Amino acid sequence: MSNAMVCYSTLIGVVLAGGRSSRMGRDKALLPWGEGTLLNHAVALMHSAGVETVKVSGDRPGFDCLPDTTPGAGPGVAISDLLASLPADAAVLVVPVDMPLLTPALLARLASVSGRAAYFEGFPLPALLPTRGPEGQPLRADALRRLHAQAASQALPLTEDEAAAFVNVNTPQEWNELERT
């Protein structure tokens, strides 16, 4: 990937919560976590990491939402659509609703990458992405790795302890395992 710099003046957080949760069999965003739901937790996590403006993908009453304009097309297309709907000079911290062990420190580290798109090595999400590519073009891809390539994203290293926070829950078995920890 190139070392192209990305200029942005605004940071916007987006919690990905518009998926079908088909492998889980029920809406992951509404699963109970802490004093609320995974969705409440993810929004609070963004705020704790210093992100003032947080939006939620999908139709989520009570939240500042961005509609899923191409339902069922997968996260690459959903993120492409979200980026296109936001200001051209913004950077977007994208966090999936189903990674509840992420920490404010990890998200703050990602958000603080100056002038670059970034993600953590081995994990395409969470990610810091510009709303436009290095040449000002809209970022558009069907897969996250292609979005990262277009944005010339930098892979940030993780320690083994940090990598343990990247638990993603997609199935009832994964959810049950997470609840036992």
Image: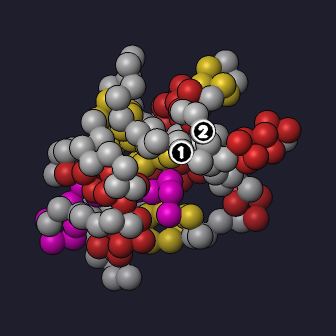
**Residue highlighted by disc 1:** 22
| Residue depicted at x 53% and y 42% | 21
Q: Which residues are magenta?
A: 124-136
How many C-alpha atoms fall within 10 Å of the one at disc 2: few (<14), some, or many (≥20)? few
Q: Foreground: 115 or 86?
A: 86
| Residue depicted at x 56% and y 27% | 30
Res. 178 in view: no
Q: Is residue 133 above or below residue 86?
A: below
Side (left or right) of 104 relative to 15: right
Q: Is residue 119 above or below residue 52?
A: below
Q: Are marks 1 and 2 in contact (CB under 8 Å)?
A: yes
Q: Foreground: 8 or 131?
A: 131
Mark 1 belongs to which amino acid? Ser
Q: How many marks?
A: 2
Asked which secondary structure carries label 1, the reply is loop
Q: Position of residue 106 (x, y in %)?
A: 59, 50
Picture disc at residue 83? none
Q: Is residue 35 above or below residue 13?
A: above
| Residue depicted at x 73% and y 48% | 174
Asked which secondary structure carries label 2, the reply is loop
**Residue highlighted by disc 2:** 25
Is residue 134 magenta-colored? yes
Quadrant for the N terminus, please.
bottom left
Q: Position of residue 2 (x, y in %)?
A: 34, 82
| Residue depicted at x 34% and y 79% | 3
Side (left or right) of 108 relative to 73: right
Quadrant for the C terminus, please.
top right
Q: CA distance from mark 1 to mark 2?
A: 5 Å
Mark 2 belongs to which amino acid? Gly
Q: Position of residue 137 (x, y in %)?
A: 14, 66
Side (left or right) of 136 relative to 27: left
